Image (spheres, rainbow, N blue to C red):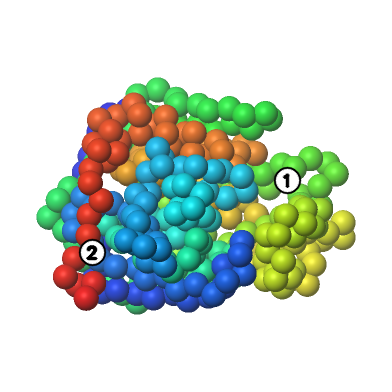
Amino acid sequence: MRIIGYRQQRTLAAPATVEGVGFVTGARVCLRFLPADANTGLVFRRIDLVDSPAIPARAARVSGTQRRTTLGPLSTGITLVEHVLSALSGLRVDNCVVEVDGSEPPGLDGSAAGFVSAIFGAGFVNQKTQRPICAASEPVVVRGPGATLALHPTNVAGLRVSYRLDYGADSPILPQTHTLTVTPETFARDLSACRTFLTEPEAHALRAEGVGRHLTGADLLVFGPRGLIDNAVRFADEPARHKILDLLGDLALCGFDLAGHVVGYRSGHALNVELARTLAGTTSEGRKAESRQVGKPTSRAA
């Protein structure tokens, strides 16, 4: 990995609050986005626990990738962070303390749209410190059973993402592909409203584990043998777009901007995080991000 450019870091101009019900637990939860000093990065803080433990959003802090991304220990960590991270990174908010009074953010409608709306409402402040933009010198590829994820080189300081979703001929979700050049504008317009999806058997299996028992087909996209149950897609390829939304949230764990063409084939959180770990470990910027102390909100958070 090499640095090919820089941009100014930025944070929020004011705090922003999002409230709702958690997808995993079904508990009511409140999340606050707080402005933070330069080089703070993205940090979650569990204010429902003694001493409000902080969990930096770094690849090295990931403790679980089963159907969602979890940061920190089971007892004090936070799960399903990818939609929040995707909203922040998609809108290029580099420094933010995310206070949550529970073990997960609000699930909202299964997309990042509610977080994006709150962030836009808070506004942005450019900071004097620069943020590096890193690119690969050669393709970086991670693989899993029947799945691949790769970052391909570029000399242009932009990020393009392509995702091929293919669950096989017997799946009620048709194969689909989406490609997007990522900017705050395209993220807000083309990705942020794309929702979590799963098949009906997957939904039954999760409920049997005690996850999402309060949810119905109207709350997210559940595909049965005859198609969507009690819902309709916002885009014809909404599942593939949501995969890119998740991917961007997981790649925010690198701690620096990526340039190049990311191509995913049937990949999910496990490969997303593996790629983030690989990239963070091969650049000095990633190692610097891991070594920084957790910062505090700025005075604007008061």
- Along the line of sight, the residue nearer the viewer: 35 or 71: 71
According to the image, label 2 marks what residue? 297
Q: Percent position (x, y) of residue 280? A: 35, 34
Q: Type of residue at label 2?
A: Pro
Residue farthest toward the top in the current orientation of the protein = 138
- On the image, the x and y values in percent for residue 194 come to 58, 62
Residue 62, position in %: x, y? 46, 42
Instruction: Spot the residue most to the left.
Output: 128
Instruction: Tell me residue 205's x, y (percent).
Output: 77, 53
Q: Amino acid at mark 1?
A: Pro
28 relative to 2 in the view: left or right: right
Look at mark 1 in the image and give the residue it sits on.
Answer: 175
- Residue at left 59%, top 42%? 268
Report the residue that reaches farthest toward the front.
Answer: 50
Q: Is residue 288 above or below residue 121?
A: above
Few, some or many residues within 10 Å of mark 1 (<14, 14–19, 20+): some
Alpha carbons under labels 1 and 2: distance apart: 43 Å
Q: Is residue 241 left or right of residue 276?
A: right
Say which quadrant the C terminus sits in: bottom left
Question: Badge 2: how crowded within 10 Å, few (<14), some, or many (20+)?
Answer: many
Could you tell which of marks 1 and 2 lies nearer the N-terminus? 1
